[in-house]
Amino acid sequence: MVKCFYCKNEAVTFRPYSGEYLCKPCFLKSVERKVQRTINKYSLLDVTDTVAVAVSGGKDSLTLLTILSKLEQRFHETKLIAVTIDEGIKNYREESLNFAKAVASKLGVEHRIYSFKNLFGYNFDEVIATLREYSLDRASPCSYCGLLRRTALNIAAKDVGATKLATAHNLDDEAQTVIMNFLRADYIRALRTGPRLEKIHPGFIPRVKPLIEIPEREIILYAYFSNIPLHSQTCPYAQDAFRNDVRAFLNRMEVTRPEVKYNILRINDRLRSFYTRLEGQLNLTLCVECGEPASQELCKKCQLLKILNQLRSSGTRKI
């Protein structure tokens, strides 16, 4: 029997990057401690914060809500509010919405749901159907969804009076994104990496990533051991071939170099001062249409909605 590194009970998992064997209780505690250390190390949260937790109903966001709820019990001035964005994807969103409601209710956390339909006038199925009908779907569905979700989360966070917006990006997500940005030479997207996105404009709620140092495998295991429901369906629009290639590459590298994803985070941290200097080049203003922060007269979300509205009103097919 392999014994736990800490308590000498039977181990149930092994961490290749640290060489530790862990039993179930010690594993759960270690993940929670690591999240607390991440929050402390990067000053992600203050005790007086009102934290909007982005909860999609997937394993990552439900794990984040569960851990933050436990940590909140020690800091009574901190307030958590779960915010869920319903994109309106038929036969996919329903299950995760139910999971989000159930877990928030179980934890006693206030839960608000915001929909693309109410915020923008279209659900995501309608967005993609319209763009495809007029052969204008030149970007991937994930790109359009990400654009709308980022705006929706910022609107939701402001609506609940949040001082921070916590998202459930994990170590794997972040390492993949850093490599993708380097390969694209995309410094604008690089500004979104790192454990916290500062308040670069008064209209932006600062974003924090408490799970950024937790590997995806450990989040799955934490959710399983904690009886957190696992969303079984795959989004019908998911087709990010580039991310899949980077994910596969990093997973192969991790077999012989277990610390590789952490190393990517470390080098990205060293580059944060460079990214911070670039923030001054963004020249953000307010969108003349919706009032959200934008780098142009119309934000990208409103540019998309303008196209959709024109197509809807014209009824003329355009190729």
Image (cartoon, rainbow, N blue to C red):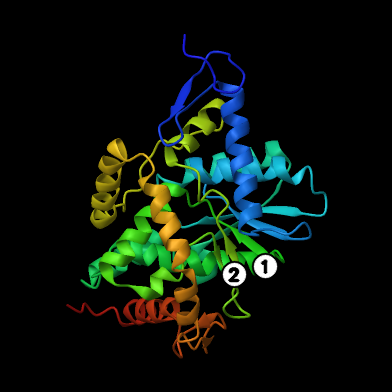
On screen, residue 303 versus residue 80, left or right, reads left
**Label 2 SS:** helix
Residue 258 image point, x, y percent:
36, 39
Q: Which of the labelled discs sits on residue 159, or is there none?
A: 1
Is residue 121 in view? no
Residue 80 image point, x, y percent:
71, 52
Q: In the rendered image, which quarter is residue 252 located in?
A: top left
Viewer-side residue, 270 vs 101? 270
Q: Amino acid at mark 1?
A: Asp
Viewer-side residue, 83 vs 89? 83
**Label 1 SS:** helix
Question: Residue placed farthest to the top in the image?
Answer: 1
* Residue at horizontal 58 percent and vertical 64 percent from the top: 207
Q: Residues within 10 Å of mark 2 (few under 14, many from 20)?
A: some
Indicate the quadrant containing the C terminus: top left, top right, bottom left or bottom right: bottom left
Q: Amino acid at mark 2?
A: Ile
Question: Residue placed farthest to the left in the image?
Answer: 319
* Residue at horizontal 32 percent and vertical 59 percent from the top: 179
Mark 2 and 1 residues: CB-CB less than 8 Å, in contact? yes
Residue 301 image point, x, y percent:
44, 76
Residue beneath disc 2: 155
Q: In the rendered image, which quarter is residue 189 located in?
A: bottom left
